[in-house]
Image (cartoon, grey):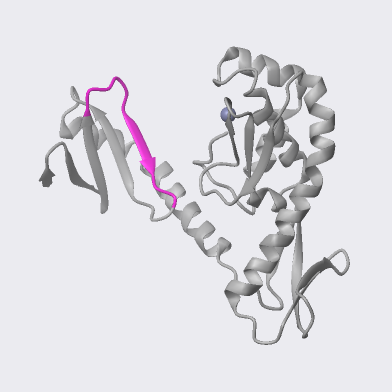
Amino acid sequence: MDTKGDRYYIDVRGISIEVVRKDIKHFYIGVHPSNGRVRVSSPLRLDDDAIRMAVVSRLGWIRRKQAEFEGQVRQSHREFVTGESHYFAGRRYRLDVIEQDVPPTVRLLNNTKIGLSVRPGSDRAKREAVFHEWYREYLRSRLPPLLEKWEPKLGVKVKEVRIKRMKTLWGSCNIRAKRIWLNLELAKKPNSCLIYVFVHEVVHLLEPDHNDRFHQLMNMFLPQWPIYKDKLNTAPLAHENWRY
Ligand SMILES: [Zn+2]
């Protein structure tokens, strides 16, 4: 055991577990998405044996999460070369990279291929930037009809919608500024997922917390939201720790 204040490590069947003891009521266990590390927050009343038992009873879940996250890391790394799979609006496409000395573009060639045209010698970072800009333009083009439909329906006014890449959130909302952030990754998802995240964030302007009222509002305005939410959590970017 490696002791460092309230934080130390125990080994449970070959898995190193970081333990943090706190004045809390409930035992909490988490697997970090990027490195698979396991961390436990434990109430002070539990001793190491009790913590060990609690971890053992969740070993199956821990291993499953670690495997899942590992798969995602592999999944999310892309070289942006011909033949690679890329997702757009819920469908998988094969990438065709065309090098030509004209301004870079991305377009759907047919139902199975996306064409990425870049200048000769463009490196991975450049190809990715062009591709992400295309995702961003796509999401931006989806926003006016969404705002037009949902603002009057919910009786709210959204000041601004911004798009950025986020690691752990599909969307977020600054209630005071009435500003909504959407994850660029939503461009890979079916349109219903975008609708779900968008409506979820707009409903936060009426109710900041995920409480009963929030769920009542979601049920009222978008009764099929649980189906959309499920879709969001399936491939290609499943992520247990995504928050909503
Ligand atoms: Zn939320």
Residue placed at 31% from the left, 28% from the top? 27
Q: Nearer the viewer, residue 202 or 68?
A: 202
Q: Position of residue 133 (x, y in %)?
A: 70, 61
Q: Is residue 174 above or below residue 64?
A: above
Q: Is residue 15 left or right of residue 190?
A: left
Q: Position of residue 118 (x, y in %)?
A: 73, 78
The stretch in magenta equals 22-33
Residue placed at 53% from the left, 57% from the top? 72
Is residue 79 among the parts visible in the rendering?
no
Is residue 33 among the parts visible in the rendering?
yes
Task: Pick out the residue farthest to the right.
Answer: 110
Number of callouts: 0
Q: Position of residue 76 (x, y in %)?
A: 57, 61
Q: Is residue 65 above or below residue 158?
A: below
Examine the image and state in which quarter residue 214 appears: top right
Q: Is residue 215 above or below residue 12?
A: above
Q: Position of residue 196 (x, y in %)?
A: 71, 34
Q: Is residue 67 left or right of residue 181?
A: left
Examine the image and state in which quarter residue 50 appears: top left
Q: Is residue 147 above or below residue 35?
A: above
Residue placed at 63% from the left, 68% from the top? 128
Answer with the quadrant where ligand 1 appears in the image: top right
Query: Residue 23 in magenta?
Result: yes
Residue placed at 53% from the left, 36% from the top? 243
Q: Is residue 213 left or right of residue 151?
A: left
In the picture, which quadrant includes the C terminus? top right
